[in-house]
Amino acid sequence: MARWTPDARSRLAKAALALYIERGFEQTTVAEIAGRAGLTERTFFRHFADKREVLFGGSAVLEAGLVAAVAEVPDGSPLEMMVAALETAGSFFVDDRRAWAGQRQGVIEANTSLMERELIKLRALGGALTGALVRRGVPESAAALATQVGLVVFWQAFGRWCRADHPADWGVTVRQVHAEVRAVVGAAPD
Amino acid sequence: MARWTPDARSRLAKAALALYIERGFEQTTVAEIAGRAGLTERTFFRHFADKREVLFGGSAVLEAGLVAAVAEVPDGSPLEMMVAALETAGSFFVDDRRAWAGQRQGVIEANTSLMERELIKLRALGGALTGALVRRGVPESAAALATQVGLVVFWQAFGRWCRADHPADWGVTVRQVHAEVRAVVGAAPD
């Protein structure tokens, strides 16, 4: 009978990240991750498809949260709605998560196969957010463009927020990057 | 002694794309691609690292061309320079290439592992273009943001240009998408 394993997912993710930092992603086996977490390989594969996926346990939660936020934000231009939705992710990107996120990002950026997974998740997020904007009545083409620009804001904001010395919280960072994107494209300040 | 193999790269790429369409990417082996091109597996691996890479033979050419273009375009805002550089890729995205590009894109979008390679190439292109803008004197952070917005223009323009029924050439498509991005972000029309 399987052991009761409260919070197995986050234990596996923490063990994996620690091992990837200590030994490198390529050199770490699933058996070692499971061992470090005090769990079996079988339990690992009940939760994650592979050694990459264990670092992306939060993606589905983030995507579901952002899609729900797009459904609920006040009416505005497609990009304004997208940015307002991104700001709500401050309940996901809490300060307690910053150190983990920064270490995780360092590991991902050092490994092409992890970066590939990251980028494909970002692409899937884009598809989901475009769908959410379309359901708000935005035409497909404008929704796709607003989402892509929104993802630029998201990705830049995330890169800054991850840094240990970044002084601002998530919502402030998103608004700041949005203002910079407006400036880059030549829009007047808000 | 190796046979003389003029244009082996493009023969391999054409054979690979044909087989990926006929049988699917997963089901096709390197031996089959080489056979279809009338070449050996050994020749394949002299030109391409793997079965994915054979569809990305143009990436390095495109990247080098765009980096050179950023170095040469007239002074302007970082995004204006980036868009001007993108427009010059009309000598790469010629009408003769459209049918190949559209078929290739269909195969890539149907296969996660090919899409991962595509996205990682796009990321590398972004890094190279940011560097090129920095060498034009643009501060790093503005260069990164202008590049990311530029890649949104590039990617959307490419998606439209690939479609067999798209009526406009590359340069016109880039300018059109740039105008739409300006509108999405709330900038006044040019």
Image (spheres, coloured by chain):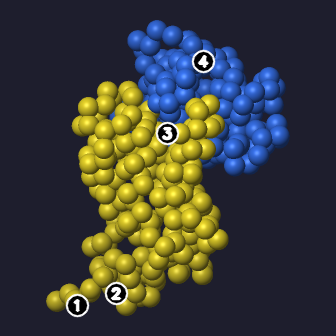
Chain colours: A blue, B yellow
Quadrant in the picture for the N terminus of chain A? top right
- Neighbour tally class for label 1: few under 14, some 14-19, many 20 plus, Cα within 10 Å: few
Expressed as whole percent of the image width and height from the top left, the position of residue B36 reads 44, 88
Q: Is there a contact, CB below 8 Å, between mark 4 and mark 3? A: no
CA–CA distance between discs 4 and 2? 60 Å
- Neighbour tally class for label 4: few under 14, some 14-19, many 20 plus, Cα within 10 Å: few
Closer to the chain start, of discs 3 and 2, is 2
Tell me the SS state at disc 3.
helix
Q: Mark 2 lies on which chain?
A: B
Residue A122 at least partly seen: no
Residue indicated by mark 4:
A190
Residue indicated by mark 3:
B149
Tell me the SS state at disc 1.
loop
Residue indicated by mark 2:
B39
Q: Are marks 1 and 4 on the same chain?
A: no
> Residue drawn at (34%, 53%), measured in percent from left and top?
B66
> Residue drawn at (61%, 26%), measured in percent from left and top?
A10
Q: Is there a contact, CB below 8 Å, between mark 4 and mark 2? A: no
Q: Are marks 1 and 2 on the same chain?
A: yes
- Neighbour tally class for label 3: few under 14, some 14-19, many 20 plus, Cα within 10 Å: many
Looking at the image, is mark 1 or mark 4 nearer the viewer?
Answer: 4
Residue indicated by mark 1:
B3
Q: In this view, does A49 lie above or below A39?
A: below
* Res A165 quadrant in image: top left
Q: Do labels 4 and 3 share a chain?
A: no
Closer to the chain start, of discs 1 and 2, is 1
